[in-house]
Amino acid sequence: MSFGLNQAQIIGRLGADVSVTATQGGRQVATLSIASDESYVNRNTGEVVDRTEWHRVVTFQDGVVEMLRKHGVKGRLVYVQGKLQTRRWRKDGETTDRYTTEVLIAPGGRVQFLEKRAPGAAAPATASGDVPADDIPF
């Protein structure tokens, strides 16, 4: 029997509008680019260093894809819970494999926008039964 835990949680801002495309089989897939920031103090110089890490997130869940298509705009603060997966592919005309590691929002995962919407913007959206961002006490 094997045991393991594969879970990733990210809070960050969308670096671009969510991209929705179709696979070769016609299934819809949403791709997100999320930036998470951190700061630390350089021991040698004493300077505060800001660092941004970019995360690629994907989902094939129909309801989540539609929610992200409508509300996933650049700059929105978002929480994502999913699992890490590494995919392998080969580009046409190349002989070596390429790899990418991404966060997959599968059934049981979560997506939640964490800030109130801007005036005049679309209604807040969540997936997996989360509380709308407007209902979160700040």
Image (spheres, helix red, strand yellow):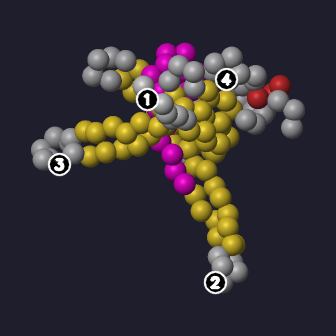
Q: Earlier in the sequence, mark 2 or mark 3?
A: 2
Span highlighted in magenta in the image? 53-71
Given this view, does label 2 or label 1 mark the residue nearer the observer? 1
Q: Which residue is mark 4?
A: 126
Name the residue carrying label 2: 44
118 to the left or right of 64: right
Disc 2 marks a residue whose amino acid type is Asn
Q: Tell me the mark number nearer the camera, choosing from 4 and 3.
A: 3
- Secondary structure under the numbered disc 4 in the rendered image: loop
* Residue type marked 1: Ser
Query: Mark 2, mark 3: which one is toward the viewer?
Result: 2
Query: Mark 1 — residue?
Result: 2
Q: Earlier in the sequence, mark 2 or mark 1?
A: 1
- Distance Cα–Cα, label 2 vs label 1: 44 Å
Marks 4/1: CA distance? 33 Å
Question: Label 1, label 3: how many angstroms apart (C-alpha)?
Answer: 32 Å
Q: Earlier in the sequence, mark 4 or mark 1?
A: 1
4 vs 2, front mark: 2
Identify which residue, 19 or 6, lies in the foreground: 6
In the image, residue 118 lies in the stretch drawn in magenta:
no
Report which residue position mark 3 lands on. Answer: 96
Residue at 37%, 39% in the rendered image: 86
Which of the two labelled residues, at mark 4 and mark 2, occupies the earlier sequence position? 2
For label 3, the crowd category at 10 Å Cα-Cα, with few meaning under 14, some 14 to 19 and many 20 or more, is: few
Image quadrant in which the N terminus is located: top left
- State the separation of the CA atoms marked 4 and 3: 39 Å
Check whether the beta carbons of the residues at disc 1 and disc 3 lie within 8 A of each other.
Answer: no
- Which amino acid, mark 4? Thr
Question: 10 Å neighbourhood of mark 1: few (<14), some, or many (≥20)?
Answer: few
